[in-house]
Amino acid sequence: MGEVRLRGIGIDIGGTAVKAGRLGPAQELELHLERPTPAREGPDALLEVLLPLLEELEAALPQSECPLPLGVGCAGLIEPTTGLVRTSPNLPGWRDVPLADLLGSAAGRPVVVLNDANAFTLAESRLGAGRSARTVIGLTLGTGVGGGLLLDGRLWTGQNGFAGELGHMPLVADGPPCLCGARGCLEALVGTPAIIRRYGEITGRVEAALTPRLLAARAGQGDGAALETFRETGRLLGLALGGLTHLLDPNLFIVGGGISGASDLILPATRGALAGSVMLPAALVPDVRPAALGNSAGWIGAALAAIERAGT
Ligand SMILES: [Zn+2]
């Protein structure tokens, strides 16, 4: 990308927390703040959280630099050109909310709004696990499975902002039901509930309050069923990445999200299944890397999107 030397602010609206931060002129992390998300109280309540955050993030800067470019990442179906939030699982009840316009007029500047997995992919590609890679596919694994596509250095969001919904690619015909209403989606096979269900199927036991973190701890202690659960999850993920490789021939895949703490247990099987499912010679099979920015990727990607838009 061109040399962009601007500060910028990014905000990541999560289901429970709003994470916000400021990138410096060399794209260094200057400041980071967090507040609870008023998820059920509507757009006005959200603005009441965001505006003081903005003020704090700009407080000590010279007036000549303000207002800084501002980007917002949010889960759900977002129209990136207009900043319209059609629906968001993190903001129940929101329908067609013009978030970029609302926040933009309150904050006195244009606002970029993008899908949170797209923000993740942009951040990891530019400043995280994918530095300098031009074509990157990002995946966030958690309760849901999100995705983002960086094609030849730019985010590809499709005609409606809907591109990169990798969690809802069908992988197994008539497979387990998915929250989207279809069956056998990637999310229904490698999302957190699927991982927990897989472990129960292997052990034949039903356990309340199991989490991937607990399973990872058991795997670390040599629990064979837990190890097999992560291996099979990784294998299924790898088959999906094989399909994506045939479609887009990326430099690499970056995998993050809530279960990235179990990357070491999942990704070896992913790499094996990917290599076994593509027509490429081994040396050309894309790398699969764990994400590097942790839970800051969302706000960092939102800030980068705003900085890059302001710089063009
Ligand atoms: Zn689905």
Image (cartoon, helix red, strand yellow):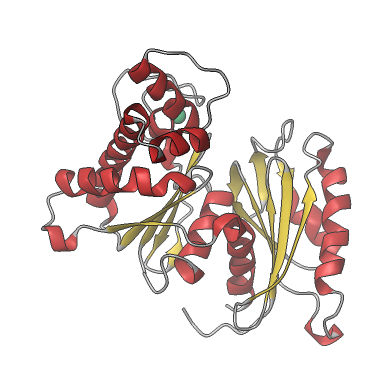
For this view, does 132 lie left or right of residue 249? right
Q: Is residue 109 above or below residue 77?
A: below
**Residue at 17% in and 43% down:** 277
Identify the image quadrant of residue 129.
Answer: bottom left
Identify the image quadrant of residue 70.
Answer: bottom right
Image x and y of residue 242, in percent:
24, 45
Total number of numbered labels? 0
Ligand 1 sits in quadrant: top left
Q: Return the residue found at the far front.
A: 221
Image x and y of residue 134, in percent:
36, 69
Q: Is residue 74 above or below residue 23?
A: above
> Which quarter of the rendering shows the C terminus?
bottom right
**Residue at 30% in and 33% down:** 232
Note whether residue 206 is visible. Answer: yes
For this view, does 297 lie left or right of residue 48? left
For the residue pair 176 and 163, the one nearer the viewer reads as 176
**Residue at 84% in and 64% down:** 107
For the residue pair 297 and 91, the one nearer the viewer reads as 297
Note whether residue 183 is visible. Answer: no
**Residue at 80% in and 69% down:** 57
